[in-house]
Image (tube, helix red, strand yellow):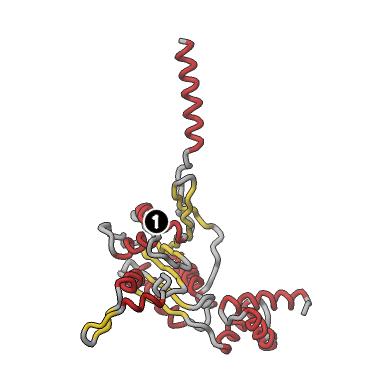
Amino acid sequence: MNELARFLERAEALLARVEALLPAANETDWAAHAFRWRRRQGRGVLEAVHHVHRMRLEDLQGIDEQKERIEQNTRQFVAGRSANNVLLTGARGTGKSSLVKGILHKYAAKGLRLIEVDKNDLVDLPDIVELIAARPERFIVFSDDLSFEASEPGYKAMKSMLDGSIAGVPDNVLLYATSNRRHLMPEYMAENLETHRVGDEIHPGETIEEKISLSERFGLWLSFYPFDQDHYLVICAHWLQELGLSAKQAEAARGEALQWALLRGSRSGRVAWQFARDFAGRQRSGTK
Protein backbone atom coordinates (compact mmCIF):
# COMPACT_ATOMS: atom_id res chain seq x y z
CA MET A 1 0.00 0.00 0.00
CA ASN A 2 2.84 2.36 0.79
CA GLU A 3 4.32 1.78 -2.67
CA LEU A 4 0.92 2.40 -4.30
CA ALA A 5 0.46 5.61 -2.33
CA ARG A 6 3.93 6.83 -3.34
CA PHE A 7 3.19 5.96 -6.98
CA LEU A 8 -0.10 7.87 -6.93
CA GLU A 9 1.57 10.84 -5.27
CA ARG A 10 4.29 10.91 -7.92
CA ALA A 11 1.68 10.54 -10.69
CA GLU A 12 -0.34 13.47 -9.34
CA ALA A 13 2.81 15.62 -9.16
CA LEU A 14 3.69 14.71 -12.74
CA LEU A 15 0.17 15.57 -13.96
CA ALA A 16 0.35 18.91 -12.19
CA ARG A 17 3.61 19.71 -13.98
CA VAL A 18 2.19 18.70 -17.36
CA GLU A 19 -0.96 20.80 -16.82
CA ALA A 20 1.21 23.81 -16.06
CA LEU A 21 2.86 23.45 -19.48
CA LEU A 22 -0.39 23.20 -21.41
CA PRO A 23 -1.73 26.43 -23.00
CA ALA A 24 -4.67 28.03 -21.29
CA ALA A 25 -8.09 27.60 -22.86
CA ASN A 26 -8.88 30.22 -25.47
CA GLU A 27 -11.65 32.25 -23.89
CA THR A 28 -12.20 34.89 -26.54
CA ASP A 29 -13.86 38.13 -25.48
CA TRP A 30 -16.37 38.34 -28.31
CA ALA A 31 -17.62 41.72 -27.09
CA ALA A 32 -14.47 43.33 -28.50
CA HIS A 33 -14.50 44.95 -31.95
CA ALA A 34 -10.94 44.01 -32.95
CA PHE A 35 -8.66 41.03 -32.37
CA ARG A 36 -5.11 39.87 -32.97
CA TRP A 37 -4.15 36.31 -33.77
CA ARG A 38 -1.28 35.30 -31.49
CA ARG A 39 0.64 32.10 -30.98
CA ARG A 40 1.22 31.05 -27.37
CA GLN A 41 3.04 27.89 -26.37
CA GLY A 42 2.64 26.55 -29.88
CA ARG A 43 -1.09 27.21 -30.14
CA GLY A 44 -2.94 30.10 -31.78
CA VAL A 45 -5.35 32.25 -29.79
CA LEU A 46 -7.65 35.12 -30.70
CA GLU A 47 -6.65 38.04 -28.47
CA ALA A 48 -9.12 40.89 -27.98
CA VAL A 49 -7.87 44.44 -28.63
CA HIS A 50 -9.64 46.74 -26.17
CA HIS A 51 -7.89 49.97 -27.17
CA VAL A 52 -8.38 50.11 -30.92
CA HIS A 53 -6.64 52.82 -32.96
CA ARG A 54 -9.54 55.17 -33.65
CA MET A 55 -9.64 56.45 -37.21
CA ARG A 56 -12.57 58.20 -38.86
CA LEU A 57 -13.12 57.94 -42.59
CA GLU A 58 -13.67 61.70 -42.80
CA ASP A 59 -10.11 62.24 -41.50
CA LEU A 60 -8.67 60.56 -44.58
CA GLN A 61 -8.23 63.28 -47.18
CA GLY A 62 -7.62 62.99 -50.91
CA ILE A 63 -8.52 59.32 -51.32
CA ASP A 64 -12.25 59.76 -51.87
CA GLU A 65 -12.53 57.22 -54.69
CA GLN A 66 -10.79 54.52 -52.66
CA LYS A 67 -12.99 55.33 -49.65
CA GLU A 68 -16.16 55.09 -51.71
CA ARG A 69 -15.28 51.74 -53.23
CA ILE A 70 -14.14 50.01 -50.04
CA GLU A 71 -17.08 51.41 -48.10
CA GLN A 72 -19.55 50.12 -50.70
CA ASN A 73 -17.93 46.69 -50.56
CA THR A 74 -18.03 46.67 -46.76
CA ARG A 75 -21.66 47.83 -46.63
CA GLN A 76 -22.62 44.88 -48.82
CA PHE A 77 -20.67 42.54 -46.55
CA VAL A 78 -22.16 43.86 -43.31
CA ALA A 79 -25.66 43.63 -44.82
CA GLY A 80 -25.13 39.96 -45.58
CA ARG A 81 -24.84 40.44 -49.34
CA SER A 82 -22.02 39.24 -51.58
CA ALA A 83 -18.77 41.22 -51.41
CA ASN A 84 -15.14 40.89 -52.46
CA ASN A 85 -11.82 40.38 -50.76
CA VAL A 86 -9.82 43.62 -51.04
CA LEU A 87 -6.17 44.31 -51.87
CA LEU A 88 -4.93 47.85 -51.19
CA THR A 89 -1.60 48.58 -52.86
CA GLY A 90 0.62 51.55 -53.54
CA ALA A 91 2.85 54.19 -52.02
CA ARG A 92 3.69 54.03 -48.34
CA GLY A 93 1.92 56.36 -45.91
CA THR A 94 -1.01 57.08 -48.23
CA GLY A 95 -3.76 55.73 -46.01
CA LYS A 96 -4.11 52.04 -46.89
CA SER A 97 -4.19 50.59 -43.37
CA SER A 98 -5.87 53.73 -41.99
CA LEU A 99 -8.72 53.17 -44.43
CA VAL A 100 -9.30 49.67 -43.05
CA LYS A 101 -9.29 51.06 -39.49
CA GLY A 102 -11.76 53.75 -40.54
CA ILE A 103 -14.08 51.11 -41.99
CA LEU A 104 -14.02 49.24 -38.68
CA HIS A 105 -14.77 52.43 -36.74
CA LYS A 106 -17.79 53.21 -38.90
CA TYR A 107 -19.33 49.74 -39.10
CA ALA A 108 -18.42 48.11 -35.78
CA ALA A 109 -21.83 49.01 -34.35
CA LYS A 110 -23.41 47.05 -37.20
CA GLY A 111 -21.53 43.87 -36.39
CA LEU A 112 -18.24 44.32 -38.25
CA ARG A 113 -15.16 42.90 -36.55
CA LEU A 114 -11.47 43.00 -37.49
CA ILE A 115 -8.87 40.27 -36.94
CA GLU A 116 -5.26 41.33 -37.53
CA VAL A 117 -2.96 38.51 -38.63
CA ASP A 118 0.80 38.90 -39.11
CA LYS A 119 2.33 37.50 -42.27
CA ASN A 120 4.15 34.77 -40.35
CA ASP A 121 0.85 33.55 -38.88
CA LEU A 122 -1.07 33.31 -42.16
CA VAL A 123 -0.49 29.56 -42.09
CA ASP A 124 -3.14 29.55 -39.34
CA LEU A 125 -5.84 30.99 -41.61
CA PRO A 126 -7.81 27.69 -41.70
CA ASP A 127 -7.86 27.61 -37.88
CA ILE A 128 -8.98 31.24 -37.69
CA VAL A 129 -11.79 30.69 -40.18
CA GLU A 130 -12.95 27.58 -38.36
CA LEU A 131 -13.04 29.49 -35.06
CA ILE A 132 -15.28 32.30 -36.36
CA ALA A 133 -17.36 30.48 -38.99
CA ALA A 134 -20.38 30.01 -36.74
CA ARG A 135 -20.29 33.48 -35.16
CA PRO A 136 -23.06 35.99 -36.01
CA GLU A 137 -20.59 38.87 -36.53
CA ARG A 138 -19.02 39.76 -39.87
CA PHE A 139 -15.22 39.40 -39.79
CA ILE A 140 -12.52 41.08 -41.85
CA VAL A 141 -9.25 39.19 -41.58
CA PHE A 142 -6.66 41.93 -42.04
CA SER A 143 -2.98 41.53 -42.92
CA ASP A 144 -0.89 44.67 -43.28
CA ASP A 145 2.17 45.37 -45.41
CA LEU A 146 2.36 42.00 -47.13
CA SER A 147 5.26 40.83 -49.24
CA PHE A 148 6.02 37.19 -50.00
CA GLU A 149 8.52 34.83 -51.46
CA ALA A 150 6.88 31.99 -53.37
CA SER A 151 8.24 29.38 -50.96
CA GLU A 152 6.70 30.95 -47.84
CA PRO A 153 3.91 28.88 -46.24
CA GLY A 154 1.78 31.99 -45.62
CA TYR A 155 1.70 32.64 -49.37
CA LYS A 156 0.19 29.23 -50.07
CA ALA A 157 -2.27 29.51 -47.17
CA MET A 158 -3.55 32.85 -48.45
CA LYS A 159 -3.95 31.50 -51.98
CA SER A 160 -5.98 28.59 -50.67
CA MET A 161 -8.24 30.80 -48.58
CA LEU A 162 -8.91 33.21 -51.40
CA ASP A 163 -9.75 30.66 -54.05
CA GLY A 164 -8.15 27.29 -54.29
CA SER A 165 -9.07 25.10 -51.35
CA ILE A 166 -11.62 22.30 -51.34
CA ALA A 167 -13.08 23.92 -48.22
CA GLY A 168 -15.29 26.94 -48.88
CA VAL A 169 -14.85 30.17 -46.92
CA PRO A 170 -17.89 31.04 -44.78
CA ASP A 171 -20.05 34.01 -45.75
CA ASN A 172 -19.08 35.99 -42.63
CA VAL A 173 -15.38 36.25 -43.51
CA LEU A 174 -13.50 38.52 -45.94
CA LEU A 175 -9.79 39.16 -46.36
CA TYR A 176 -8.44 42.73 -46.60
CA ALA A 177 -4.70 43.12 -47.19
CA THR A 178 -2.29 46.00 -47.85
CA SER A 179 1.00 45.93 -49.68
CA ASN A 180 3.48 48.26 -51.34
CA ARG A 181 3.65 45.70 -54.16
CA ARG A 182 0.72 45.11 -56.47
CA HIS A 183 1.51 41.44 -56.90
CA LEU A 184 2.69 40.95 -53.30
CA MET A 185 6.00 39.48 -54.45
CA PRO A 186 9.36 40.85 -55.67
CA GLU A 187 9.70 41.07 -59.44
CA TYR A 188 13.05 40.63 -61.19
CA MET A 189 14.34 41.76 -64.57
CA ALA A 190 15.36 38.23 -65.54
CA GLU A 191 11.75 37.08 -65.33
CA ASN A 192 10.92 39.18 -68.39
CA LEU A 193 13.13 36.86 -70.43
CA GLU A 194 10.52 34.14 -69.93
CA THR A 195 7.95 36.16 -71.89
CA HIS A 196 7.22 34.64 -75.29
CA ARG A 197 5.25 35.52 -78.38
CA VAL A 198 2.45 33.43 -79.85
CA GLY A 199 1.32 34.98 -83.10
CA ASP A 200 0.58 38.60 -82.29
CA GLU A 201 0.03 37.88 -78.59
CA ILE A 202 2.58 38.26 -75.78
CA HIS A 203 2.41 35.63 -73.05
CA PRO A 204 4.14 36.08 -69.67
CA GLY A 205 6.38 33.29 -68.40
CA GLU A 206 5.38 30.83 -65.69
CA THR A 207 7.20 32.76 -62.95
CA ILE A 208 5.29 35.96 -63.67
CA GLU A 209 2.02 34.06 -63.99
CA GLU A 210 2.58 32.52 -60.57
CA LYS A 211 3.21 35.92 -59.00
CA ILE A 212 0.13 37.45 -60.58
CA SER A 213 -2.05 34.52 -59.50
CA LEU A 214 -2.21 35.59 -55.86
CA SER A 215 -3.23 39.21 -56.36
CA GLU A 216 -5.77 38.16 -59.02
CA ARG A 217 -7.68 36.24 -56.36
CA PHE A 218 -8.66 39.51 -54.68
CA GLY A 219 -11.91 40.69 -56.23
CA LEU A 220 -11.31 44.37 -55.53
CA TRP A 221 -8.02 46.21 -56.09
CA LEU A 222 -7.52 49.71 -54.70
CA SER A 223 -4.42 51.66 -55.77
CA PHE A 224 -2.83 54.51 -53.81
CA TYR A 225 -0.43 57.05 -55.28
CA PRO A 226 2.14 59.54 -53.87
CA PHE A 227 0.68 62.92 -52.87
CA ASP A 228 1.53 66.14 -54.64
CA GLN A 229 2.38 69.26 -52.67
CA ASP A 230 -1.13 70.71 -52.58
CA HIS A 231 -2.61 67.42 -51.44
CA TYR A 232 0.00 67.12 -48.70
CA LEU A 233 -0.71 70.66 -47.43
CA VAL A 234 -4.46 70.00 -47.33
CA ILE A 235 -3.84 66.98 -45.10
CA CYS A 236 -1.50 68.97 -42.85
CA ALA A 237 -4.14 71.71 -42.43
CA HIS A 238 -6.83 69.14 -41.63
CA TRP A 239 -4.81 67.49 -38.88
CA LEU A 240 -3.67 70.80 -37.41
CA GLN A 241 -7.28 71.90 -37.04
CA GLU A 242 -8.25 68.49 -35.64
CA LEU A 243 -5.54 69.03 -33.02
CA GLY A 244 -7.07 72.33 -31.95
CA LEU A 245 -5.36 74.99 -34.08
CA SER A 246 -7.28 77.62 -36.01
CA ALA A 247 -7.48 77.80 -39.80
CA LYS A 248 -5.23 80.87 -39.66
CA GLN A 249 -2.59 79.01 -37.63
CA ALA A 250 -2.79 76.06 -40.04
CA GLU A 251 -2.24 78.40 -42.99
CA ALA A 252 0.78 79.95 -41.28
CA ALA A 253 2.31 76.49 -40.86
CA ARG A 254 2.59 75.81 -44.61
CA GLY A 255 6.28 76.73 -44.84
CA GLU A 256 7.25 74.52 -41.92
CA ALA A 257 5.11 71.70 -43.30
CA LEU A 258 7.02 71.80 -46.58
CA GLN A 259 10.37 71.86 -44.78
CA TRP A 260 9.28 68.87 -42.69
CA ALA A 261 8.39 66.90 -45.84
CA LEU A 262 11.69 67.87 -47.46
CA LEU A 263 13.67 66.60 -44.48
CA ARG A 264 11.70 63.36 -44.46
CA GLY A 265 12.04 62.91 -48.20
CA SER A 266 8.34 62.17 -48.54
CA ARG A 267 4.94 63.83 -48.85
CA SER A 268 2.38 61.43 -47.46
CA GLY A 269 -0.54 61.31 -45.06
CA ARG A 270 1.69 59.74 -42.44
CA VAL A 271 4.29 62.51 -42.75
CA ALA A 272 1.52 65.14 -42.60
CA TRP A 273 0.16 63.58 -39.39
CA GLN A 274 3.61 63.50 -37.82
CA PHE A 275 4.22 67.14 -38.72
CA ALA A 276 0.84 68.20 -37.32
CA ARG A 277 1.53 66.47 -33.99
CA ASP A 278 4.92 68.15 -33.72
CA PHE A 279 3.72 71.62 -34.74
CA ALA A 280 0.55 71.59 -32.63
CA GLY A 281 2.50 70.35 -29.62
CA ARG A 282 5.06 73.15 -29.96
CA GLN A 283 2.36 75.79 -30.37
CA ARG A 284 0.58 74.68 -27.21
CA SER A 285 3.78 74.61 -25.20
CA GLY A 286 4.75 78.06 -26.44
CA THR A 287 7.95 76.85 -28.11
CA LYS A 288 8.97 77.53 -31.70
Q: Quadrant of the C terminus?
A: bottom right
Q: In the visual, does 236 lie left or right of 200?
A: right
Q: Between residue 258 and residue 54, name the one nearer to us.
A: 258
Q: Secondary structure at mark 1?
A: helix
Residue type indicated by callout 1: Val
Q: What residue appears at the point 27 percent right and 57 percent down from the top-left corner?
A: 167
Q: Image quarter for residue 76?
A: bottom left
Residue projecting furthest to the left: 199
Please provide percent x and percent y for residue 162: 33, 65
Q: Image quarter for residue 176?
A: bottom left
Residue 217 at least partly seen: no
Residue bearing mark 1: 123
Q: In the visual, does 132 lie left or right of 253?
A: left
Q: Using a 10 Å C-alpha cutoff, classify the residue at mark 1 as few (fewer than 14 neighbours), some (14 to 19) or many (20 or more).
A: some
Q: What residue appears at the point 45 percent right and 78 percent down from the top-left corner?
A: 67
Q: Between residue 125 and residue 202, name the one nearer to us.
A: 202
Q: Quadrant of the N terminus?
A: top left
Please provide percent x and percent y for residue 148: 42, 66
Residue 257 at least partly seen: yes
Q: What residue appears at the point 44 percent right and 62 percent down from the top-left corner?
A: 113
Q: Image quarter for residue 86?
A: bottom left
Q: Between residue 89 and residue 265, name the one nearer to us.
A: 265
Q: What is the tally of numbered marks visible in this picture?
A: 1
Please provide percent x and percent y for residue 223: 43, 79
